[in-house]
Amino acid sequence: MTEYLGTFNGSKLKIAIIVARFNDLVTKRLLDGAFQTLAQNGVSKEDIDIYWVPGAFEIPRVAQKISQKGNVDGIITLGAVVRGETSHYESVCSGVTSGIAQIALEGKVPVMFGVLMTENMEQALNRAGGKAGNKGSECATGLLEMIDIEQTIDRE
């Protein structure tokens, strides 16, 4: 039996982070968590490109373009969709989830899903450095692990 476990060594990696500006009280905290975690694991700040998009719905389009270019080792997507008074929430959540999932499967590099979908702002803030940790940071460690696993597979 052979077992593969990715490492968190980010040296010499180029990372793209796509961040939604909408609900930036939350997304800036997610970005801080991702950025700090990448830096703590050896990714140089010069090797991190941050792309700000208007909202979560626009994330898949930019992720697709970045993945197609193939000049990064991985992509982190960060956003916050908070339920409001209309059915818009379901449409945005569905579109973002489907779009990012498609890119993760068909793209050239690993993509981590860090778009929060919460019932209220308190839940979002709790997941952006509050009681429930920081999902941006979790995406960063997950991405480093996925990059390492995929590179191992490619070498075999």
Image (spheres, rainbow, N blue to C red):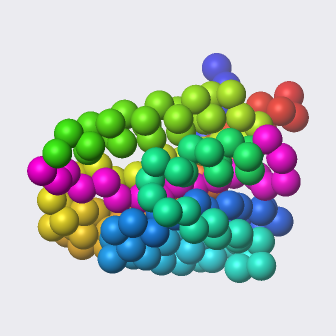
**Residue 116: x %, y % from top left:** 33, 53
Quarter of the image with the C terminus is top right
- Hey, which quadrant is residue 60 in on the image? top right
Q: Position of residue 103 (x, y in %)?
A: 62, 35
Question: Of all residues shown, which one is farthest toward the top?
Answer: 1
Q: Is residue 122 above or below residue 65?
A: below
Q: Quadrant of residue 82?
A: bottom left
The quadrant where residue 1 appears: top right
Whole-percent x, y for residue 85 in the image: 12, 50
Who is closer to the viewer here, 19 or 61? 61
Q: Is residue 11 above or below residue 69?
A: below
Magenta stretch contains residue 56: no
Residue at left offset 34%, top offset 68%: 23
Is any atom of residue 30 visible in this view? Answer: no
Q: Is residue 142 left or right of residue 70?
A: left
Residue at 61 percent across and 62 percent down: it is 17
Let me know if residue 79 is in the magenta part. yes
Q: Which residues are magenta?
A: 68-85
Q: Provide residue 35's location: percent of width, then percent of height.
A: 56, 74
Identity of the residue drawn at 58% across and 29% down? 102
Q: Is residue 116 visible?
A: yes
Count of marks, rendered view: 0
Q: Give the left or right position of residue 27, taking residue 34 as reference.
A: left
Q: Is residue 125 above or below residue 80?
A: below
